[in-house]
Every structure is written in C-alpha cells, then in structure tokens.
Amino acid sequence: MEIKIFGVIGAGQMGNGIAQVAAISGFNVIMNDISMEFLSKGMKTIERLLIKGVEKGKISPDEKEAVLGRIRTTTDITEMKSADFIVEAATENEPIKFQLFKDLDGICAPHVILSSNTSSIPIGRIAAKTRRPDKVIGMHFMNPVPVMKLVEVIPAITTSESTLRITWDLAVKFGKTPAKADDYPGFIANRILMPMINEAIYCLYHGVGTRDDIDTVMKLGMNHPMGPLALADLIGLDTCLAIMETLYKGFNDSKYRPCPLLRKYVEAGWLGRKSNRGFYSY
Ligand code: CAA
C-alpha cells in the first residue's frame, strides 16, 4: 500500500510536530483541527522551526518552502477522505477520541489505517468504536516530535499484522526508531515516565525538596536532559494528569494515584508551557 497523503488530526504541539516530520519526509500532509486559529498557530510553529533549520544551515530556503507547500490545513474533517493513513493527535480525552474515530471510520476509505497518538488510552477501546478494528493502532510520538527519535507502536488485540508492519515501516520512513509496546494503560513510555513525574510532584507537595532541587537532582544525578518538573511543564500538566488517571483507573492500583498538587495546578489553569505557568513561569 502506497501512502501519498498523510492525515493529521490536531494541530497542537504533537500534531504540528507530526505534520512537520511527515512533510520533511516527503509526504503530502492534510492537517485538521476544529478552528483556523489552532491551525494557523500550528503552521506558525512549523514555519518558525523550519526558519531555524535554514539559519543553522540544516535545510535550504527552497526546501523550507517545499516542506511548507506539502502541508494543507482544513477545519473540515471530511477532507480526510483523500488521506491514505491517519494519525490522530487530538486532546487526551476519551469521548473526543472515540467520536473522532467513529467519524473517521465513516469518512476514510476502508483500507486506510487509523492510528492514534494517544499517550495512554487503550488502543483496543478506540478500535472497538470503528468497523475496522484490525486497522486501528497506536503510533505514539514523543515531544518535541522533530527531535525525539522514538515512536512507540502499539497494536491492539484486534490489530492485524499488516497494519503493524505498515505503521512500523512508516515510523522508519519518518527517520524514527519504532519500539513495540503491548496495549495496556500507559504502554511502556508513560507507564515508566509518568509515575516518576508524579513522584517528583509528590516530593514538592511533601516538601522533600524545592522545585529547583528536585529538578537538579534528576538532571545532574541521573543525567536526564531536563528535570521532571520542567518536563511535566513541557508535556502539559493536564496531559500528565489525564495519563495518571488512565493508569490509576486502568490498573485499579493506588500506586498510580495522581498527586493532589498536580490536580490543583490543572484546576487553576496552570498547565505548563502552553499556559505560560506551571511549575515554572514562561
Ligand atoms: N521543537 C523542535 N525542536 C526543538 C524543540 C522543539 N520544541 N526544542 C528544542 N529543539 C531542538 C533545538 O532546536 C536544538 O536543535 P539543534 O541540535 O539542531 O540545534 C535541539 O533540539 C536541542 O535543543 P536546545 O539546545 O535548545 O536544548 P536542549 O539541548 O536542552 O534540548 C530537549 C531540548 C530536546 C527538549 C531536551 O531537553 C530533551 O530531550 N528533553 C526531554 C524530552 C523528553 O523527555 N520528551 C519526552 C516527553 S514524554 C512524551 O512526549 C510522551 C507522552 O506521551 C507524554
């Protein structure tokens, strides 16, 4: 199956990163979101990063224009009918994702693979909302998408071998290294990462250390490129909370309970970098 047009649902930090990587890899991309405002914000981010690439001599000005020219934006989800492969990168919210997959199942041709960039929602549950559960799979990119080499590939119990192979090969074509995870809440990446971040927030909540001391311990003591609280701000505190809730409910195990301080920040609208305030101010 030849993939010519790659469809991306969502123009947020994950969606625009995925669109950029796909366009750089030579695919024509249609990026969809619910408003033109979100789409133009996503396109501005892509353009800004490409301009940086030109300034650093990594790409030529002509290549930059060609990449931008390969990305089309639309608020009309029915335009996804021309896509050969979809990755959904909407907000980490079950009802929203379920509705999107139902809609995409009706819009896209029957052979099209519908993948989700969900960070923790079971893929089998998403697949069950469609009439093509063999063609639904998790394709989990890491943030910032243009920089991080990993794509976690998550077949559901219903996913076919050929869907897995096509998705795996696509990740390689994007210049990424795929790793396969079984379909349990949080998969591998967030099963390990999020409890660490949540525990760092508990350290702050219990007064074990200040924000800076907690991040310094992990940066200098464990060689992490950034501290867990700074990383939580990068990921988005609402996303961190949603993932902890999924782990907590999915395993029915109190070891995954989200820290009350994380919940408090999210309720206050302190979502990290995207709202200019989280554990740090931006
Ligand atoms: N988008 C694109 N490129 C970016 C970027 C962004 N948002 N942020 C940084 N970069 C690029 C820079 O342009 C720079 O490129 P060059 O090497 O070509 O100059 C390179 O990345 C390094 O950036 P900096 O020198 O500015 O800063 P740094 O060395 O501190 O790296 C970082 C920044 C890549 C974010 C690094 O701190 C890092 O790897 N942090 C950890 C990120 C991480 O853990 N991500 C996974 C999050 S979990 C997830 O995504 C899954 C989930 O479901 C929640």
Image (cartoon, rainbow, N blue to C red):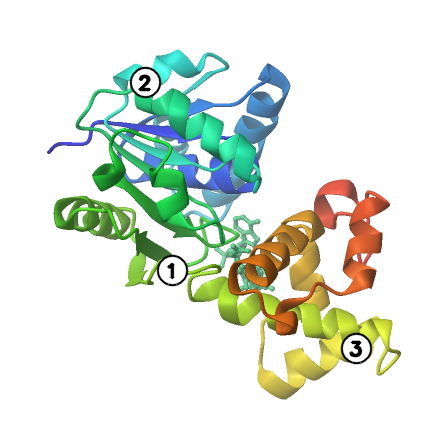
Cα gap from disc 1 to disc 2, whole angstroms: 31 Å
Number of the label disc, if any, that sits on residue 150: 1
Between 201 and 19, the residue placed more toward the observer is 201
Q: Residue at x 34, y 39 (%)?
A: 127
Q: Nearer the viewer, mark 1 or mark 2?
A: 2
The amino acid sitting under disc 2 is Gly
Q: Residues within 10 Å of mark 3 (few under 14, many from 20)?
A: some
Residue matched to label 3: 203
The amino acid sitting under disc 1 is Leu
Residue matched to label 2: 106
Quadrant for the N terminus in the image: top left
Q: Quadrant of residue 279?
A: bottom right
Q: Locate residue 229, reporting x and y percent.
A: 72, 66
Q: Locate residue 218, reporting x and y percent.
A: 66, 80
SS for dot 3: helix
Please, is residue 197 above or below residue 50 in the view?
below
